[in-house]
Amino acid sequence: MVAEQPTIILTLPVPPSANRLWRHYSRRRKPTLSPEYKAWLIEASWLAKMQLIGAPEIKGKFRPHIQYPENNRRDEDNWVKPLLDLCQRVRAVRNDKGSRGLTMEPVKRTDCLIALYDLGGEPYPEPVKRSLRGPPKRPSVSRAMKWAEIQSKLRPR
C-alpha cells in the first residue's frame, strides 16, 4: 500500500559529502568518523528527533524522496548515504535496507528535505549494532595455556 502523503518529513542541515564521512589517519589505525561528520551527526540528530516526536517508526519498506540545494556541485549519490544513515540512527526507519525507489530533486533551498513514504510489507529485523573498534580479540594460545596452568595450581586436590 503506497501512501499518498509522506509518513515522515525531515528538514535537515546539509550533510558532508559521502566521500568525507571517514578519515584514514594511518595504515595501522582503522578508519574513524571524520570530525566534520561527527559534528553534523550530533546537530542533525537533535533536529530530526525534535521533528519525529509522535511519528511512527517505518518498520518495513519505504520510498525516500530527497530535496537538496541545487547550487551544489556534489554528485547526487553523495547525498543519500549520510541522510539514510541518519534516518536509521534516529529511528525514523528501522533499517535503511528497506529503501525502494529513491527519488532526488535539486531545488532552491539552503537545507535538505527528506520525505519518507511507508510502503508497508514485512518488518525488517533490528540492525546489528557494531562497534567501530571491531570484535574483541581472542586471547593467544600461550596466554590461555598459562591461565589454565595457574588455575590447575589453585584447585584443591
Image: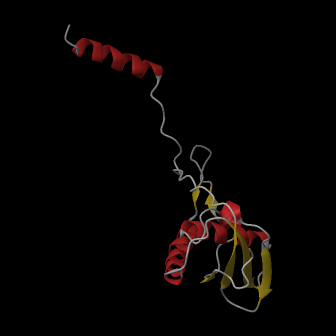
Measured as percent of width and height from the top left, residue 114 is found at 67, 80
The total number of labels drawn is 0
151 sits to left or right of 45:
left
- Front in this rendered view, residue 94 or 76: 94
Quarter of the figure that contains the N terminus: bottom right
- Front in this rendered view, residue 4 or 95: 4
Quarter of the figure that contains the C terminus: top left
Furthest-top residue in this view: 157
56 sits to left or right of 108:
left
Decide: is 85 above or below 156: below
Measured as percent of width and height from the top left, residue 24 is found at 62, 54
- Front in this rendered view, residue 57 or 137: 57
Measured as percent of width and height from the top left, residue 51 is found at 53, 83
Give the residue at x 50% y 78%. 49
- Front in this rendered view, residue 1 or 58: 1
Decide: is 82 above or below 139: below
Measured as percent of width and height from the top left, residue 124 is found at 63, 58
Decide: is 62 above or below 53: above
Quadrant in the picture for residue 149: top left
Residue 73 visible in rendering: no
Furthest-bottom residue in this view: 108
Give the residue at x 25% y 12%. 153
Residue 89 visible in rendering: yes
Q: How is the image coloured?
A: secondary structure
Decide: is 18 above or below 68: above
